[in-house]
Amino acid sequence: MSHAASLKTFKLSIVAPCYNEAPGLPEFVRRIKTVCTTLDCAHEIVLVNDGSRDNTLAVALELADRDPAVRVVNLLRNFGHQAAVTAGLDVAEGDVFVLIDSDLQDPPEVILEMVDAWKSGADVAYGQRRKREGETAFKLFTAKFFYRLLRSMTKSNIPADTGDFRLMDRRVVEVLRSMRERHRFIRGMVSWVGGTQVAVTYDRKPRFAGETKYPFRKMFAFAIDAITSFSVVPLRFVTWLALGIISLTILAGIGVVAVKLVNPNYFIPGYPSIIITIVFFGGVQLLALGIIGEYIGRMYESVKARPIYIIEQVYQQRSGRVEGQVPHRV
């Protein structure tokens, strides 16, 4: 379907990863349905259960039993947020897609503005946060630092203060479906695709229920995935570091020779300087090996070509009851 034709009649796919989101899931679906009713368009709500440990699956199935527009993708275990998003995009069947977390920090009502931007010709309308209520000063600082660091280290123009909350035309999603790297950074991948991408600003709200699923450990791992997926600057940093140390060593050697010529007894024999030198160079070598190892490890996992996710079943109401299908795309 062409973009012009799809403006008149289009199907909207809402893709929402869910991990231990049972308390807030009914309210999330209710607000999404209100948005879809306002748009008066065909729609589906794809809830991806990413190995939740609470009764998220049971709540999602109950919602699917009530509404044929709700589809539940149940992953065999927890594969992580980015893999769950990928599974939802692979299963969804719309003409235009919206990625949104089910914790209601990103207001579903913003989708109305995103659809307007899409109708005006945008291929991607991404949510850009003006305010972030309910988040610590540390979280706000690290988020700002991360995006600015990432933009300085990569060739992709990844907007600052954004998440995965965005609307995408089907053409963009088809390209994303062809990109099967294991360590995924969806917002960076969307930026890399290009096209007309516009910002829709909004105020991010506190969680409706439950606790954050991104503690510092996961945030740090996510940042490493983002940087290594889109930049070789860390590898070049090792090269420049090595060249810098070699230059300093040459200068130090020249200085030692000069001092020895002027005053042969200036230096006191001993081991401290030797030990410091050995420890310093040992640290540099370990740093270099660690950075190189990060890239080699990612290449190793990619070569194995294991699936990004495994779907147990896709549930949807058919003939008045919830039935399951098992797709094979992974």
Image (cartoon, rainbow, N blue to C red):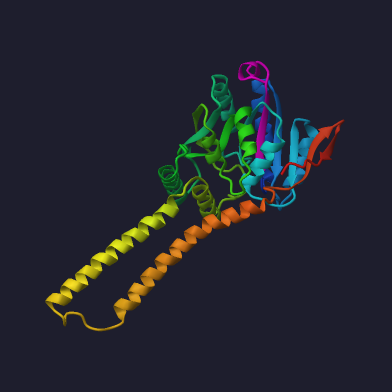
Q: Residue 82: percent from the left, percent from the top?
A: 61, 45
Q: Residue at x 68, y 18 (%)?
A: 9
Would you say residue 317 is visible in this rendering?
yes
- For the residue pair 91 and 275, the one nearer the viewer reads as 275
Provide residue 194's location: percent of width, then percent of height: 52, 31
Q: Position of residue 134 (x, y in %)?
A: 51, 45
Quadrant showing the N terminus: top right
Q: Is residue 142 above or below residue 25?
A: below
Point out the residue furthest to the left here: 262
Pick the front one: 219 or 188: 188
Is residue 98 visible in the rendered image? The answer is no
Q: Check the picture and name the quadrant holding the C terminus.
A: top right
What residue lies at 51% left-to-right and 29% top-to-bottom?
197
The answer to which of 15 and 136 lies nearer the viewer is: 15
Is 5 included in the stretch rendered in magenta?
yes
Q: Quadrant of residue 246?
A: bottom left
Where does the magenta region start and end?
1-17
Residue 292 inside the magenta-drawn segment: no
